[in-house]
Amino acid sequence: MEFLFNQLVFLQKGIVKGLKYIPWHKIDSYEVQSIDINNRHFGFDKKVNDGFEMKLHSGRSSQVSLLVTSTEAYEQLQILLESHGIKQKA
């Protein structure tokens, strides 16, 4: 059984995750990590194990983390973020 716990919504002016709204211009950068055996999310589900963890950074200490379970979704998110001038953290 699958269910949506902490919803993520992409809007024209920003992102809503749960009760938190982040306008596009507040997101500084993002980073992506493959979910491997050392990742805290590893082992929950095969879809998660084969996916990515993406962290959106806004401000010095604020970040939003999301799990991406397919390469196609990851590529679409990259395009969306880059279209708003948000670059991947080096």
Image (tube, rainbow, N blue to C red):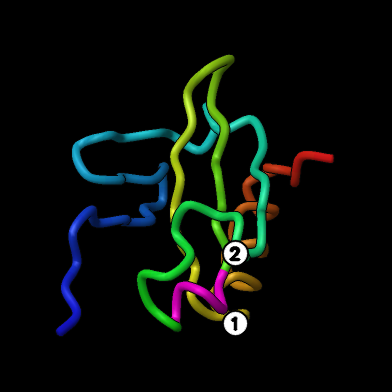
Q: Percent position (x, y) of residue 44? A: 36, 70
Q: Which segment is the magenta one?
A: 47-51
- Quarter location, residue 30: top right
User: In this rendering, is residue 1 above or below 35?
Assistant: below
Near-viewer residue (40 or 24): 40
Would you say the magenta stretch is mainly helix, strand or loop? helix
Compared across the picture, whether 44 is left or right of 34 comes to left
Q: Quadrant of the N terminus?
A: bottom left
Q: CA distance from mark 2 to mark 1?
A: 22 Å
Which residue lies at the image location 49% right of the left edge and 67% below the top edge? 68
Mark 2 or mark 1: name the one nearer the start of the chain: 2
| Tag 1 secondary structure | helix
Cβ–Cβ below 8 Å for labels 2 and 1? no
Compared across the picture, whether 77 is left or right of 20 comes to right
Question: Where does label 2 land, which residue?
Answer: 37
The mark total stands at: 2
Question: Label 2 is placed on what type of residue?
Answer: Ile
Compared across the picture, whether 56 is left or right of 20 comes to right
**Which residue extends farthest right?**
90
Which residue lies at the image location 43% right of the left edge and 70% below the top edge? 43
- Quarter location, residue 87: top right
Q: How crowded is the residue under tag 2: few (<14 C-alpha within 10 Å), some, or many (20+)?
A: few
Question: Where does label 1 land, which residue?
Answer: 72
Q: Percent position (x, y) of residue 45? A: 38, 77
Which residue lies at the image location 70% right of the left edge and 43% below the top edge? 85
Would residue 66 be counted in the magenta stretch? no
Between tags 2 and 1, which lies in front? 2
Q: Quadrant of the C terminus?
A: top right
| Tag 2 secondary structure | loop
Compared across the picture, whether 6 is left or right of 74 comes to left
Q: Percent position (x, y) of residue 83? A: 66, 55
Question: Label 1 is placed on what type of residue?
Answer: Glu
